[in-house]
Image (cartoon, rainbow, N blue to C red):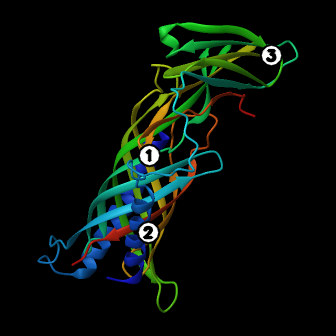
């Protein structure tokens, strides 16, 4: 429930700011014009207990500064996890997990870090299907849909966006914190 | 194209080049070559030591197959078993922790690989360690 509220809150923030930008443009002709470029991205999200690699490809509208991409995140190693099987029986498995997600994001409020570095705030959500497997058994971790909001900032590095965000990622493990830092290189493919 | 994009392309090229496998028809007369097929190797079980001993069960294949190879109680933090290669082994260790029982599981395949060197077929096999040590 908290995650859904988070998502709606971020979506609302993004939409409100978007509406203001359109109003400031002033004309109805420019309202629905798109300037879309394909993007690819590579990154990771980490905390002190876990680490996922993340790759994606999608599109970014340079006018509205809204992007969408299909991503695949995965833990590149088997991690020991403990799961309560019955009231007094705990299983320690070696687990690998994957997330196939649709990432929606928006860059907000451009500002200058220095004369050469442009940046903006970034908000969005990774929504998708989380699944995995355990070593040595046909049993699998509980799979399902998940919505993971993120917020942070983005630095434009002469052709590439370096995104640094806080990600709320619930991978359904009690022993791993839901808070993560996500680092991502997002490359718009412009001619 | 700017310098960052160039750096990424160079990096990806290096990774691709590094991941290439060596030429299968190569010949190195100094290479130590085992020409006899390796049919067994060591399976090491690594556990968290407990005074009362840790019961373990070693299975052939997945747990669900229930093909028990060894049933034992270990009193030291590691123990080796010499077992046939080409098989996936799965081990369970049973720990007492207050009112709870923690069952740690790990699984790996004991493999033998072959390659050709100077017209000889060479075999190699690495022993495996099943890590049943409890999370701290």
Precedes in sequence: disc 1 or disc 2? 2
Look at the picture and state if B92 lies above or below A109: above
Q: Mark 3: which secondary structure? A: loop
Precedes in sequence: disc 2 or disc 3? 2
Residue A95 spot, x, y in % from top left: 53, 32
Q: Residues within 10 Å of mark 3 (few under 14, many from 20)?
A: few
Q: Nearer the viewer, residue B104 or B106?
A: B106
Residue B117 spot, x, y in % from top left: 45, 44
Judged left or right of residue A57, residue B99 is right
Residue A133 spot, x, y in % from top left: 46, 29
Residue at the (65%, 24%) spot, across then down: B42
Q: Nearer the viewer, mark 3 or mark 1?
A: 1
Residue at the (29%, 65%) spot, across then down: A39
Q: Nearer the viewer, mark 1 or mark 2?
A: 1
Q: Mark 2: which secondary structure? A: helix
Q: Which residue is mark 3?
A: B98
Q: Mark 1: which secondary structure? A: loop
Precedes in sequence: disc 3 or disc 1? 3
Look at the picture and state if A74 lies above or below B15: above
Q: Which residue is mark 2?
A: B11
Q: Chain of mark 1?
A: B
Q: Are marks 2 and 3 in contact (CB under 8 Å)?
A: no
Q: CA distance from mark 2 to mark 3?
A: 51 Å
Look at the picture and state if A153 lies above or below A101: below
Look at the picture and state if A74 lies above or below B60: below
Q: Residues within 10 Å of mark 2 (few under 14, many from 20)?
A: few
Q: Which residue is mark 1?
A: B118
Quick check: do tags 2 and 3 share a chain? yes
């Amino acid at each position: 429930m908290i995650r859904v509220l988070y998502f709606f809150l971020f979506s609302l923030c993004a939409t409100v700011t978007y509406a203001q930008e359109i109003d400031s443009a002033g004309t109805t002709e420019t309202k629905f014009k798109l300037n879309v470029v394909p993007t690819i991205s590579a990154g990771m999200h980490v905390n002190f207990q876990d680490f996922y690699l993340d790759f994606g490809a999608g599109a970014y509208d340079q006018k509205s500064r809204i992007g969408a991409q299909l991503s695949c995140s995965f833990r590149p190693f088997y991690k020991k996890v403990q799961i309560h099987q019955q009231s007094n029986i705990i299983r320690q498995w070696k687990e690998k997990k994957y997330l196939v997600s649709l990432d929606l994001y928006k860059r907000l409020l451009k500002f200058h870090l220095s004369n050469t570095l442009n940046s903006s705030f970034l908000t969005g959500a990774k929504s998708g299907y989380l699944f995995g497997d355990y070593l040595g058994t046909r049993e699998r971790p509980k799979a399902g849909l998940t919505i993971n909001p993120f917020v942070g900032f983005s630095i434009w590095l002469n052709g590439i966006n370096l995104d640094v965000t806080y990600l709320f990622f619930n991978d359904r493990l009690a022993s791993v914190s839901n808070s993560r830092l996500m680092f991502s290189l997002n490359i718009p493919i412009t001619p | 194209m700017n310098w960052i994009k160039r750096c990424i392309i160079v990096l990806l090229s290096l990774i691709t080049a590094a991941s290439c496998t060596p030429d299968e028809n190569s010949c190195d007369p100094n290479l130590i070559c085992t020409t006899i097929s390796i049919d067994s190797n060591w399976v090491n079980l690594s556990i968290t030591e407990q005074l009362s001993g840790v019961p373990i069960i070693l299975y052939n294949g997945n747990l669900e197959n229930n093909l028990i190879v060894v049933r034992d109680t270990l009193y030291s933090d590691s123990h080796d078993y010499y077992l046939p290669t080409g098989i996936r082994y799965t081990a369970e260790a049973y720990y007492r922790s207050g009112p709870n029982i923690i069952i740690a599981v790990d699984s790996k395949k004991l493999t033998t690989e072959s390659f050709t060197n100077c017209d000889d077929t060479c075999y190699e096999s690495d022993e495996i360690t099943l890590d049943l040590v409890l999370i701290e």
